[in-house]
Structures are given as C-alpha cells and as structure tokens.
Amino acid sequence: MAAGTRVSKGLDGVVVGRTEISWVGGETGDLVYRGFDVRDIVPGVPYESVVHLLLHGEPPSADPSPEVVEALRSARAIPEALLRGADSLPPGLPPLEALRSLISLLGDGSYGYPPRLEEGYRLIARTPVLLARYVRRSGGEGWSPPPEGISLAESYLWMLRGHAPDPTQVAALEGYLDLLADHGMNASTFALRIAISTHSDLVSAATGALGTLKGPIHGGAPSRVSEMLDAIATPDRAEAWIRDRLARRDVLYGFGHRAYKTDDPRGVILHRIARDVADPARLELAEAVERAALAALRATHPDARLFTNVEYYSAVVLEAVGLPRELFTPTFAVARTAGWTAHAIEQASDNRLIRPDLEYAGPAKGRRWPRPLPAR
Amino acid sequence: MAAGTRVSKGLDGVVVGRTEISWVGGETGDLVYRGFDVRDIVPGVPYESVVHLLLHGEPPSADPSPEVVEALRSARAIPEALLRGADSLPPGLPPLEALRSLISLLGDGSYGYPPRLEEGYRLIARTPVLLARYVRRSGGEGWSPPPEGISLAESYLWMLRGHAPDPTQVAALEGYLDLLADHGMNASTFALRIAISTHSDLVSAATGALGTLKGPIHGGAPSRVSEMLDAIATPDRAEAWIRDRLARRDVLYGFGHRAYKTDDPRGVILHRIARDVADPARLELAEAVERAALAALRATHPDARLFTNVEYYSAVVLEAVGLPRELFTPTFAVARTAGWTAHAIEQASDNRLIRPDLEYAGPAKGRRWPRPLPAR
C-alpha cells in the first residue's frame, strides 16, 4: 500500500543534512569541534570557551570566554515562580527523571522560534543549578548558592556539595564537560533537531533530547559500567566474569559504538584524565576489565570492530570526581546543553520539516466494524 | 570529510521502518487504522474503541471497549505526590507548556523499557486529567473530579467546565479524538520512536513527542486558523484578505500537508462534523475563506497540489466544542497519546537505534587554539 523506495531502519548512513558544528570521524577516531581536534583542546580549554566555540564558530578572545562567562552569569538567576515549581517536584525521583521535568519547567512561554542565543545561555546556565538544587533538597541537605566568579564545572560540584570542591576533581570534570559538549548527529540531537524542524522551541526540543539521551543504549549506560566494575571487584576476576557474561549473551556496557570503528577519542582522553584523578586500584581494575572485554569481544565478534566507547572511562572519571552514579547521565546532559543549543540554532538557520515515512505492513483497507454504527 | 552516500534533508520519502498501526495514503486521501478506513468508523466508534483497535490491532468485543474502559478507569487515579508536583506548576503558563511538564511529571522512575500496555493506559488516562486540572486551577476556578462511568471525551469537557457538557459537543469531540488518534509517521511520532529506540521510556518519549507536536508547522497551528477567521470576520472580505496575505508571502495556516496530495480525509470528516455542531455563521465564514484560499493558492502555486489540511476544520470543530484556542494543540495531544503508545510498543517490538548522519561542512581539522594550553 505504501511505496517506499528507500528503507533504512535505524537510518544508518542516511545523511539528513549538513552541520558546521562538529565532525565525528568514525573510521579515523576523530572528534572535531569547528575545525579543532578535541585532542588538541582537551584538557586545557575551559568549558566556557568550548561553549563559545560551539555557539559562535570561533575561539573566544581570551580563556575562559569573557562573553560566555558574562552571559551565563546573567542567565543563571532563576525566576521565583520557576523555583517554586522546581522545588515542588516529588522528592526522591531518579535525578534523570527530575531533570526532564526541570528542563521542561524552564519553558514559560517565552521561548520561541527561531531559537535565540540568549535562550541557549539560559538552558546552559540553569540546567546545572536546577539539577543540583533538586538533588540537594531531595536528599534533605541544605541548599546554598555557589560563590560568584567560579567556572560552571566548579560551580556544579560546589552546588552538589555545598562547599568548594577539590581542584583536581574540577579539572577532571571540566575535561569531561568539554568532551561531551557535542558529538555531531546522535539520537538525542536528532530528536532535538526534529522538534526544532516543526518550529517548536529550544526548551521543548531539549526536553525531548533529554528523554532520548536517557535510553541506556544512548546516554543512559555509564552507571552500568560502574556496576560491572563493582561486580567484578578485582582484576583477576575480569576474564571469567566477562566470558560468563558473553556466554549468556548479555550486553557489555561501555563497548561498541554506531559511529566509531576504532578508539573513541573521547575515551582515550578520559582514560588519560582518569590517570590523574582516579583511585589507582579502581583504575587498575578498569584497565584489566577493558583488556579482558576487548579480547573476549574480538574473539566472539571477530568482524565487528568493537572498541571501548566513551561511557567506559566516563564512568571511571565521574566516579573519581565524586559523583553518585544516578548523576552520570544528568551530568552528560549538563555538558550537552551546549551542543543542543548549537544544533537548534543551526537547524533553524536552514530548516526543513524532518518527516520520514513508514512502510505500512498492517491489514489492508476495507475491514468493517463488527457492529453497526449510529447514523450520521 | 564525511562520506554520505544519500543526503535527504527532511527525510522526504525515506522509509525508516514498518508499521501495522495506520496507513496514510497521501495520493488517495486515505487514513486507515489497522485496516479500517477512518471514513467507515468516524463518527460513531467511541474513542475507547479506537484506542483498543490501535493498541490491540482488533476491534473490541463491544463498544465502548470494556477492557479499555476498565483499564483507563483504574489508571486514572493519580498519586498524591504527583498531584502536588502538578499543582505547583507556575500558574498562567500556556497550557501546552504546562502539558509538557505535566506529561514529564508522570515519570516517577517506574516507566521502563520495553514500554508496557498499562504504562500506555496511564499516559492516555492521566493526560486529560492533569491538563484539565491545571487549566481550572490556573484560572482560579474550582476543580471537581468528573462522575464515574462517562467517556474520556465527556470527562475531558466535564473537567474543563466543572459540569456536564452538551451531548452534541461531546459527540463532536469524540469524532475529533478518533480522527487525531494516530497518523502513521509524523514528526512527533518519529521523535517518540527515536527516544524508544535508545531504550528510553514511554513518558520520556511522549514528553519529547509533545515538544515536537508543539511546533506550528506540525500540531501547533490550529489556533492560527481561528485567528485568521477572526481577522477576516465576514465572508465577503475573504478574497481580498487572502490575496493580500499571499502577496506579502505570509503563510496561510490550514492548507498544505507533506503527505496529502489530495483532500485530507480527516478534514473532510471534520467539515461534516462542523456542520452538526458549529455556529452557522462561523461555518459559512470558514467555507468562504477555504474557497478563497484554495482558489488563490492554486493560482499562485499551480503545481503544488495544495489542499485543506486537518487543522482547518479542527479549528472550526474545537471552537464549536467550546474549547479556548490555547487548548487546541493540547487536545490534539490528548487524542494522540493513543497513537504514541501504539508506536512506542511497536518500535520496541523490533527495535534498532535510530541514528542518521550529518554531513560535516565546517572548517577542516587542524586549527590551533590561539593561546597555549596548560601542560597536561
């Protein structure tokens, strides 16, 4: 009944448009932000400067970007009505569930089409504040606003703890935020671009992106890496555990990626960051499990070109930064608000409604309702 | 730098999978739910029976579906913590903004992957309750729960008004809900299926779908049809107004659709329903504006095959049902929760991560940060 000339379940290899924001080189293991190889800028470039680069296309005049620092500072103050709504969320929700509602609550009718840069700054600045506030209040801990003049990375940890964080942890988190700030097309960015393509607004689109990021085969898995490391517990148990897991055809989280057919550059850099910040025993365990997993996966899937993905050392780094596991994916979202904003603005700059087809494979037209209907 | 073999901005004609739920015959003007032509079941089949058909694939044993009536009845009671959160949304939000947060609030950590039928019943049953409650409370009007044992359509109007609605209006709304319950692939359903494809949950996916539906070139436009009718005011002014509007290259809402190259069957049926329920002068105006718009559009766009779309007579019917304009798109969403649930379950039944590519058109790799970075 339907005439589809090109069927592509999963849309592998289907190109839905052009972007100037970032390039994912799946064959070569590259991630490039507007011409800058992430290996050349992470760690070292402050997150605020990466935000500047993603949103404006050029590096700032100084680090951290004075414009972005000022824009985020002035966007951070949250209206009272919004705070009251946020503070009335049921306590005890998984933070990722809460964050979806918190991002949605940002939308007060003032976000329009096309999305504007200052709306993006509100999204980027307010997301970590609302998230940290919810987590603290929900845990029955006091909430205090962070000092002025510190970076988004430091401020995020400050708010979650209620006191100044360790500088090594701040630096590690900064590298993580830089690396997760954008990643070309992916399922959540795609969902966001679809929403924008209907002329919807940034908050609606970002809420949908978060709901998509939540899926464990997209952004929702790093905590499962930590669970795996806990279960294995010591390096000598890695091989047997992995073998048993694969024999039961269970998923190994932290390995394999739709785009990368080689090392994910983010994983390589996060591994290096982990060496600076992680507990040595935990790092040793993670490295042993990685070796065992790659060896086993390559034996069982010789043609699949499976590599460690970004989630593996994300988990190790975020653990070392002191974040509880239920905050791993929300923290991914905090980083990605920058990329989401850039993609929303780019989609609107040259828009076409994104609307594919489905092939109908149901019963043919012409069935009759089993009972008479009332006369029209 | 990227190698995309197939570029399809907007994904026109790209088939992303198979569905057995509904078929949109764009060339023939057909909408078929699991083999049933909507022209043969609307009006007449209760919305609860359409829900049954969409979710189970077969018509129910009686009308309205006893199983669905019972499932919705038992899903409708909303936990106190959720009501407290919902009641704390800032008052005075546009109902569509509020609805995005209300749907998100449904997610309490209990919705998982794969999506389950009873989760769908919660979404379908609770969405109109939370929406109506917000609208009443936000307007400073009292809230009372509706009587037991009435249909979802009647209950929705009852809740919005605080008293029993006119049966003609209930019947018209029932036809509207039936017709808007599903529509093959479209941008919001696509966003929902992408979220499910990452193994996210029904609430996250539906929240994203709502954020996508919000866009005026998807579901967010019917109120603009009413605004146009108001601006034109009398049938004799239609031609000049339309001509002037087109001369300024402004969009005419209510005409043209990506899929339909002939009359949208939903529009045809809604026009018939409008004859039963609308104020005769308003209907006469709508018909005069439609004639003038189609004549003008066909003169200015002779090759475009432009027809009246579903939003045009949706606006006339929803006005006649007594709904304020800001509830038009939220009411569309109330109807569509059925289709969203069906698509979420179908996507999970044969899933593959939906993740297309973008062609990178930004600066080539190799740019250098303008300042030295701290040593690693």
Image: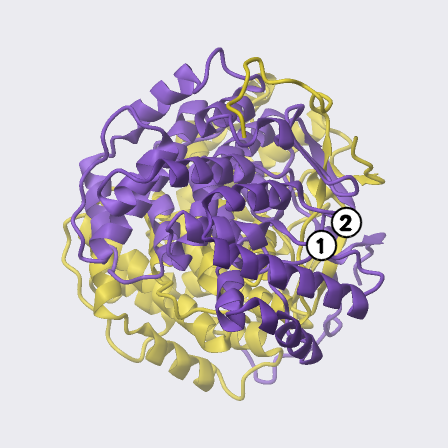
Chain colours: A yellow, B purple
Residue B256 placement, left or right of B156: right
Chain of the residue that carries numbered disc 2 in the rendered image: B
Q: Position of residue A314 (x, y in %)?
A: 48, 50
Q: Residue furthest bottom?
A: A61
In depth, the one of B29 and B279 nearer the eye is B279
Question: Can you tell which of label 2 and label 1 is closer to the viewer?
Answer: 1
User: Mark 1 falls within which chain?
Assistant: B
Name the spot of residue A374 as percent of width and height, x first. 50, 23
Q: Is residue B124 visible?
A: yes
Please say if the residues under marks 2 and 1 sit with CB atoms less than 8 Å apart: yes
Q: Amino acid at mark 2?
A: Lys
- Residue in the image at 71% along x and 54% along y: B307
Amino acid residing under circle 1: Phe
| Residue where numbered disc 2 is placed | B261
Q: Which one is nearer the viewer's eye here, B201 or A223?
A: B201
- The residue tagged 1 is B307
Rendered residue at 18%/57% (across/down) = B140
Q: Residue furthest top?
A: B61
Q: Label 1: how many residues lie within 10 Å, few (<14), some (14-19) or many (20+)? A: many
Picture quarter with the N terminus of chain B: bottom right
